[in-house]
Image (cartoon, rainbow, N blue to C red):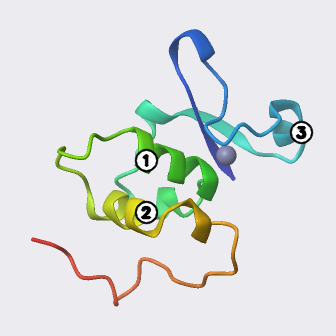
Amino acid sequence: MIHLTLTGYHAGVPYCNTDRAQAREAGDTMVHGIYAPLHKPEYRARCCPACLQVWADEAYDDTDEMPDWVRELRDNGPDDIATDDTRSYGPHHQARK
Ligand SMILES: [Zn+2]
């Protein structure tokens, strides 16, 4: 799993605030969120869902143009993350253009 991390003063801290030592032990990797190729669905599939949720909530202002997957995460909200939600970015997803 890939955790997205902050840059700047808190550089290296995962968005989801997981324990870094434990994450490394589990074989997880850390990538700076702003450099991660999050536009690629196959890359997002390997990312930590909690980190992606924080990214979706924090990286854009409400008035910004944002990718559909970010909109979807923001609409769903963080509560869906902890459930056994089987929704995915599948064919049900309508592009909003
Ligand atoms: Zn994470």
Which residue is tagged 2?
73
Q: Position of residue 79 (x, y in %)?
A: 60, 66
Direction from residue 24 to residue 70 in the image, left or right? left
Distance from mark 1 CB to nearest ligand 1 atom below 8 Å: no
Question: Crowdedness of circle 1 by 10 Å Cα count: few (<14), some, many (20+)?
Answer: some
| Sequence-earlier tag: 3 or 2 | 3
| Residue shown at 52% from the left, 51% from the top | 52
Q: What element carries label 2?
A: helix
Q: What element carries label 3?
A: helix
Q: How far apart are marks 3 and 1 (CA)?
A: 25 Å
Circles 3 and 2, Cβ within 8 Å, touching? The answer is no
Q: How far apart are marks 2 and 1 (CA)?
A: 8 Å
| Residue shown at 60% from the left, 17% from the top | 11
Which residue is tagged 3?
22
Direction from residue 18 to residue 3 in the image, left or right? left
| Sequence-earlier tag: 2 or 1 | 1
| Sequence-earlier tag: 3 or 1 | 3
Hey, which quadrant is residue 95 in on the image?
Answer: bottom left
Identified by mark 1, the residue type is: Asp
Direction from residue 77 to residue 46 in the image, left or right? right
Q: Is mark 1 on a helix, strand or loop?
A: helix
Identify the mark at residue 57; answer none if there is no mark: 1
Q: Which of marks 3 and 1 is in front?
A: 1
| Residue shown at 89% from the left, 39% from the top | 22
Above or below 93: residue 76:
above
Identified by mark 3, the residue type is: Gln
Q: Distance between the residues labelled 3 and 2?
A: 26 Å
Closest to the observer, 31 or 83: 83
Q: Where is residue 43 in the image (x, y as percent from the top left)?
A: 49, 56
* Residue that protrudes farthest toward the top in the picture: 9
Circles 2 and 1, Cβ within 8 Å, touching? The answer is yes
